[in-house]
Amino acid sequence: MSSPPVALVAIIQIFFVLTESTYVEHEHGEFTKPLWNSTYTDQLKRDLLTSYDKFARPTQHTNITTVIMDIDLKHVHLDDAKFLLTVNAWLKMKWRDDKLQWNASDYGGLKHLHLADHEIWQPDIALYNR
């Protein structure tokens, strides 16, 4: 049985060393990526979403969340013989999320942040056909 090439063993060892060093252990045992590689965008996203509850409506001082909806019809097709209506459309929704506010000067003047839809609260929508 032959031993693995020295270069392969060295590469595997370097991989494990680099993988282990990409996380920093805090006093209370929590591991996070180090801030030395962090940008203002990374820090802002971390600060906003750490305690953000995406299942709670984004309201602080009122019981109302106003959602503005806009639908752009792209294609409508009616098949009379099959009693079938096919619609292709874009649905746009806009609302104010008071929990996602920050002071731009604290984050290098950053005024806009792009977040994935699964990271934030979204209104529940149901298509209803009578």
Image (cartoon, rainbow, N blue to C red):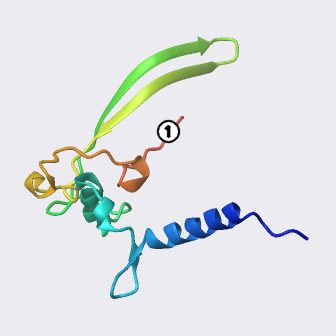
**Residue closest to the eye, 81 or 49:** 49
Position above or below: 23 against 105: below
129 left or right of 119?
A: right
Residue at image x 30%, y 59%?
Answer: 38
Name which residue type carries label 1: Leu
Question: Picture coordinates of residue 128 (x, y %)?
Answer: 50, 38
Question: Picture coordinates of residue 77 (x, y %)?
Answer: 56, 14
The image quadrant where one finds the N terminus is bottom right
**Residue closest to the eye, 53 or 82:** 53
Task: Count neighbours of disc 1 (C-alpha within 10 A) and say few if under 14, some if 14 to 19, many if 20 or more.
Answer: few
Question: Picture coordinates of residue 89 (x, y %)?
Answer: 46, 24
Residue at image x 10%, y 56%?
Answer: 103
Question: Picture coordinates of residue 54 (x, y %)?
Answer: 36, 60
Position above or below: 49 against 96: below
Q: Can residue 57 be spotted in the picture? A: no
The image quadrant where one finds the C terminus is top right
45 left or right of 125?
A: left
**Residue closest to the eye, 8 or 107:** 8
18 left or right of 42?
A: right
Q: Can residue 105 be spotted in the picture? A: yes
The residue at which mark 1 appears reads as 127
Residue at image x 40%, y 86%?
Answer: 29
Position above or below: 80 against 108: above
